[in-house]
Image (cartoon, helix red, strand yellow):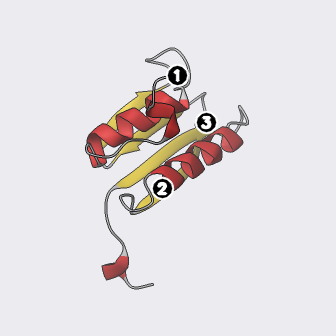
Amino acid sequence: MSSSSITTPRIAIHYCTGCRWMLRAAWMAQELLTTFEKHIGEVALIPGSGGVFRIWVNDELIWDRKQMDGFPDIKELKQRVRDRIAPEQSPGHSDKPAS
């Protein structure tokens, strides 16, 4: 793949390996890639330590587990990503009101 075929934005999920949060990070990455497949250039999973769980869109921190007292609900995460990369797009069924 040539670098010209890679588009922005880049999402990075920095997770704690000691806390065993890789599966959570990978699941969130899968959800974001599925929902925003035409808008995301890359999702990086970055192993860390010390209870870290942060999500970045380009250089903007959109979630910090320690500051926000927990993990994002997938609906909220998709809304935060959508607002930054594709405000015109619905983040899928999770954005629709319950009937």
Residue receiving disc 3:
49
Inter-mark Cα distance, 2 to 3: 19 Å
Dot 1 falls on a residue whose secondary structure is: loop
Tell me where residue 65 appears, x and y as whole percent. Answer: 51, 24
**In front of the other: label 2 or label 3?**
2
- Residue at position x 55%, y 49% in the image: 29
Q: Looking at the rendered structure, which numbered label has been put on residue 43? A: 2
The numbered mark, 1 or 2, whose residue comes first in the sequence reads: 2
Q: Residues within 10 Å of mark 3 (few under 14, many from 20)?
A: few
- Please state which of residues 38 and 58 is positioned toward the viewer in this rendering: 38
Q: Which amino acid does the dot numbered 2 rest on?
A: Val
Q: Residues within 10 Å of mark 2 (few under 14, many from 20)?
A: some
Inter-mark Cα distance, 1 to 2: 29 Å
Q: Which amino acid does the dot numbered 3 rest on?
A: Ser
Point out the residue furthest to the front here. Answer: 99
The numbered mark, 1 or 3, whose residue comes first in the sequence reads: 3
**In front of the other: label 1 or label 2?**
1
- Please state which of residues 46 and 98 is positioned toward the viewer in this rendering: 98
Q: Quadrant of residue 53?
A: top right
- Residue at position x 54%, y 26% in the image: 73
The numbered mark, 2 or 3, whose residue comes first in the sequence reads: 2
- Residue at position x 37%, y 40% in the image: 81
